[in-house]
Image (cartoon, rainbow, N blue to C red):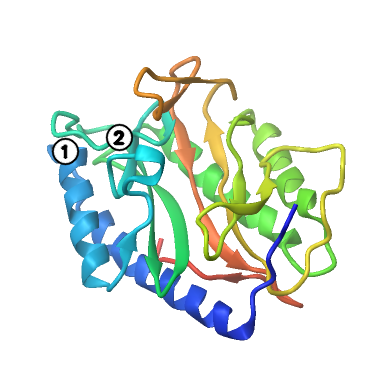
Amino acid sequence: MAVTVKTKREIELMRESNHRLEKVFDALEKMIRPGISTWEIDQAARRLIKEQGGVPNFLNYDGFPGAVCTSVNEEVVHGIPKRDRILKEGDIISLDCGLILNGYHSDAARTYPVGEIAESEKKLIEVTKASFFEGIKYARAGHHLHEIGNAIGDYCESRGYGVVRDLVGHGIGREMHEDPQIPNYRMKSRGLRLVAGMTLAIEPMICEGTWEVDWMDDNWTVVTKDRKPAAHYENTILITDGEPEILSRTHD
């Protein structure tokens, strides 16, 4: 495992890349409403990333056809934007998006309500977001990597939610996916020791029902096996000697 520790200059570049991504998310959130297609959201993401001076890092990544993953209801992650996928009242949608600026990647995800949604879905979104903040209490130099996932998993499972095991968080920097892999569930090992300068994408993927998932025939879209809703919350963070810095913080 080759985990990169970023220099001061690299951290500045990562910070700026993520700051630009914040602006993209702020604009995309305003678009979420019944009647809009996921294709329209993707087209807006492409334009917004370009306006920020960046390049979409998801577009054509291993063949993915969009600049943003648009995952609706039971779709956990990697939903492909489509002209005929129209959002309707009561849906929830997870947007997972990133960009490259000056050679450095940013990555974040949010789950949004479409109009008025059920209380159960509101709670799912709230717990998923809260679990991220439970996890990063341990994202500081001197702690161990798996303490983050242990906290996320324990928080969600103690409230009756499923924590996806087939997909995990990751390091990030010059590449979108770098070492280490970051599980969101309890591990027996402690994992590597965290040091200041590591940049990590922490991303709880939480299900209303079972943690088990299926891959759809498009080889991208991941759905819950029981087809109950799922939520996703992700930020790129910087490990420091004190509190972690959330590089991709938005006004959510």
Residue at screen point 36% across, 17% down: 217
The first of marks 1 and 2 along the sequence is 1
Query: Which image quadrant: the C terminus?
Result: bottom left
Q: Nearer the viewer, residue 90 or 77?
A: 77
> In this rendering, does residue 133 appear at all?
yes
- Taking the image as shown, residue 136 lies to the left or right of residue 108, namely right
Residue 245, quarter of picture: bottom right
Q: Which mark is residue 37?
A: 1
> In this rendering, does residue 120 appear at all?
no
User: Is 221 located above or below residue 133 in the figure?
Assistant: above
User: Is 21 located above or below residue 86 in the figure?
Assistant: below
Residue at screen point 30% across, 63% down: 24
- Counting from the top left corner in percent of width and height, residue 22 is at 37, 67
- Counting from the top left corner in percent of width and height, residue 240 is at 71, 75
Residue 87, quarter of picture: top left
Query: Helix or strand or loop: what does disc 1 sit on?
Result: loop
- Counting from the top left corner in percent of width and height, residue 37 is at 16, 38
Query: Helix or strand or loop: what does disc 2 sit on?
Result: loop
- Taking the image as shown, residue 171 lies to the left or right of residue 97, namely right
Residue at screen point 68% across, 66% down: 4
- Taking the image as shown, residue 203 lies to the left or right of residue 194, namely left
Q: Which residue is mark 2?
A: 80
- Kind of residue indicated by mark 1: Ser
Mark 1, Cα crowd under 10 Å, few <14 / some 14-19 / many 20+, is some
- Kind of residue indicated by mark 2: Ile
Q: Which mark is residue 76?
A: none
